[in-house]
Image: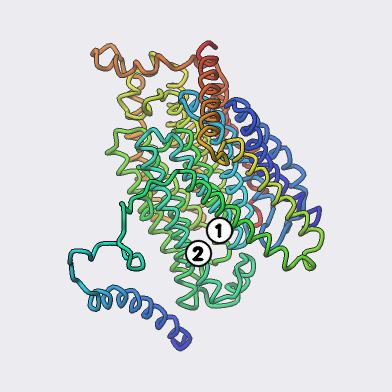
Amino acid sequence: MTPSDLQALLPHIVVAATAVAVMLVISFYRNQTVSAVLTVAGLFAAAACLPFVWSAEADAVPPLFRVDPFGCFHIGLLLTASVAVTVFSHSYLEKYRMERGEFYILLLLSVLGALVLTVADHFISFFLGLELLSVSLYVMVAYIFTKKRAVEAGVKYLFLAAATSAFLLFGMALIYAELGTMAFPEIAAELGGGDGLRSPYLLAGTVLVVAGAGFKLSVVPFHMWTPDIYQGAPAPVTAFLATVSKACVVVVLLRFLAAFDSDAVPGLYLALTVVACASMLTGNLLALLQDNIKRILAYSSIAHFGYLLVAFVAGGPAGAMAATFYLVTYFAATLVAFGVVAYLSPSDREADTVADYRGLFWSRPGPAALLSLALFSLVGLPLTGGFMGKFFLVGAGAEARLWTLLLVLAVSSAISIYYYLRVVVAMYSSIEDTPQTRELSEPFAATPPYGNTVGAVQALLALGLLVLGLYPQPVLAMIQSVTRTF
Amino acid sequence: MSAAPYWPFLVYTAMVFILVAGMVIVSSLLGTRHRQRVTGEAYESGMPPTGSARLRLSIKFFLIAILFVIFDLELVFIFAWAISIHELGWPGFWGMLVFVFILAAALVYEWRMGSLDWTERAIERRLGERREAMAKRWKEAEEA
């Protein structure tokens, strides 16, 4: 560890130190707002370190980490999302009579895990980051332990993540047995000269590692857990699961798959193509059957990561650029959507059925407008970030001549319009029809007015969505400069 | 591509299945199945057992056991550092200092949460304090 190594890992160190600080503060002074403010301050401080890290050398801290501009960009993205999740959690947990400070320690630790993954360049750091992320998430998912569904979701996530870790570890072991190295650059070097996945060990190992990452990204056929856990987890945690815990796996997978040349290993890319098509179709078709908005968003996230795999298959700088830009737009839209759900949820249940949202626009225009903007972006309507995201995905796919994938993408996007707009239609329909519908919108009477921090954060995210849709050039230029190395 | 280097792997896989199947099958074949008056009783050096086996242990034992396991595991890392202290030099020392500081912070947290209280009275007092503090916070929140 040289001083320059420490400099390169400054954001990680700051987040870790904040977790310990929050723990010490809770020991002597319990106050949810103090814990939350300290958390946000820590996350901002970590983000403030980024300029120093950006200037660090590209190969900082080998062999475990590779702190390059690409990693730095994602660190910034994850920290921003974590700030939003912290703000949502604060207003969400206010409704519960329980010890709430520990939630922020867990949040910071899982953010740390995610940050480790974004710069991981070695199987060891890959695995450590993933475990740090998952172990804190088990508890966060089940944090409202008075709710049966939350505990159920927590246990399910525990089993699932344990199985995932087993897959990953066995895959890593097989690759190590064949190549004798766990560092991504060395794996790339070993594979570069040879004839692709030349041995059964290597093939099995790669498939197991990709399957393990697939579980975390919840792409078909590793998606079974997603709806249940999204539904059961507290809404801010669901937002975290859908954004931060997936994006970091995308980053590590991009780094890992950069070692595999698509000409040398056609089988792997065929498998990714099949998984992408299956995710897009399954996610969008099953979402049609749901009446629960959290489940709808769960299936929609399955489909979105199917779209994202198109960029993986396309590969190269264009693919990495499209994937990164898509992640940014997906982050903003998903955070707004789950933020609205978290904000509207009363303390006894989650406001998650489509019926809950009937006529929302007439009683609470602010949240309804933000949620519709987020859903429009998830559909990919023009003027929103989602449209630009899909545009670049299609561009990357067309450049690589992936016509089958693009056809499936177009068809499944068309299907997805129905279930997103169903929620939107519900929000703008009239509530004067029956006394029953009036009763349904009653829980929202108890929620505080929308002029607080949560509203401000959501408005900023929504503004970001519009900016990404109307004037994406600055973000795009930045992403292009950080993905040049792929 | 020759299959020669892979036979140990296949043998290993086969052995895993044989071992697991063997453990189930052999024990079911060799296991005795008699059921008599005292078969189900605990055998404690020939002494007739007294009382029920379902003792109620205080949750404290569990808590202390967990805390012991946690800190005991951390000790493993300190041992690993101790045997390579010369190779690691000062950077290793500072790293270990940070590690021990985090452990100490966790210990402070446990102490303040009351995990280390042993007597009923101390536990009651601390729980009472926390309940009062929480009630006070809620009252303030409702007034605000």
Q: Position of residue A135 (x, y in %)?
A: 51, 49
- The residue type indicated by label 2 comes to Leu
Element carrying mark 2 = helix
Image mark for residue A127: 1
Q: Residues at badges 2 and 1 in contact (C-beta under 8 Å)? A: yes
Subunit bearing disc 1:
A
Compare residues B137 and A478 and report the one nearer the observer. Answer: B137
Q: Residues within 10 Å of mark 1 (few under 14, many from 20)?
A: some
- Residue A84: x %, y % from top left: 56, 32
Say which label, 2 or 1, has the lower sequence index. Answer: 1
Work out whether residue B92 or residue A372 is closer to the camera in this orientation and state it. Answer: B92
| Tally of numbered tags | 2
Image quadrant in which you'd find residue A215: bottom left
Q: In the image, what residue occupies the spot 61% across and 62% down?
A: A122
Residue A184 visible (yes or no): yes
Point out residue A463 in the picture as x, y percentages from the top left corner.
56, 27
Residue A323 at least partly seen = no
In the figure, A362 relative to A405: above or below? Answer: above
In the image, residue A71 above or below residue A195: above
Relative placement, left or right, of A111 versus A431 is: right
Q: Which mark is residue A169?
A: 2
User: At label 1, which amino acid type do we have?
Assistant: Phe
Residue A386: x and y, percent?
Answer: 49, 37
Q: At x 55% / y 30%, what residue is drawn?
A: B126
